[in-house]
Amino acid sequence: YTATSTAGFATVAETGGGVFLGFSDVVAINNAGAVAFGAVDVGGGSGLYVAEGGPAVRVIGFGDALDGSVVSRLDLGVNGLSDARVLAFRAELTDGRTGIYTVVVPEPATVGLVAAAGLGLVAAARRRAK
């Protein structure tokens, strides 16, 4: 989903667009305009996402590996996204532990470069396989 703007309002993410089914009650925004939120995607996965002027990027979700276990619940606070692009969140793990974690969210351009590099590697591997 790509953000759109109408009369001063910007749509960061919405249901009905083929990506998200619903959202958590808490949304965090930093001074650069990056927005962090919890969501359920159309595939049924739940997680924390960050969007900044483009498609939302999934940062972590239920079922992901974390700290030697697996995420079973995630919570985000209203101040959970810093200006340095550090996302702070609470996670419950399947082994019974609960913790507060942080992760640096990559710049949107970095995410695009990583995706492009990955596609380039796949194409190169296919050419070599032929």
Image (cartoon, rainbow, N blue to C red):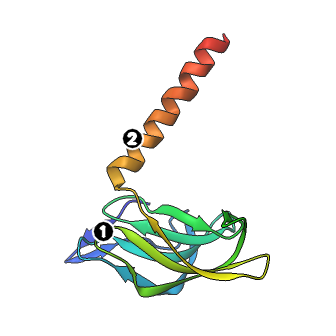
Please name the amino acid that badge 2 sits on: Leu
Badge 1 density bin: few <14, some 14–19, many ≥20, Cα 10 Å: few
The quadrant holding residue 5 is bottom left
Q: Secondary structure at mark 2?
A: helix
Residue 106 picture location, percent across and down: 39, 56
Of 55 and 50, which appears nearest the observer? 50
Please name the amino acid that badge 1 sits on: Ala
**Residue at 39% across, 45% down:** 112
Of 1 and 118, which appears nearest the observer? 118
Residue 71 picture location, percent across and down: 69, 72
Q: How many labels sit on residues?
A: 2
**Residue at 72% across, 81% down:** 97
- Above or below 124: residue 13: below
What residue occupies the far left of the structure in this picture?
Answer: 8
Q: Which residue is mark 2?
A: 113
**Residue at 63% across, 65% down:** 42
Q: Which mark is residue 84?
A: 1
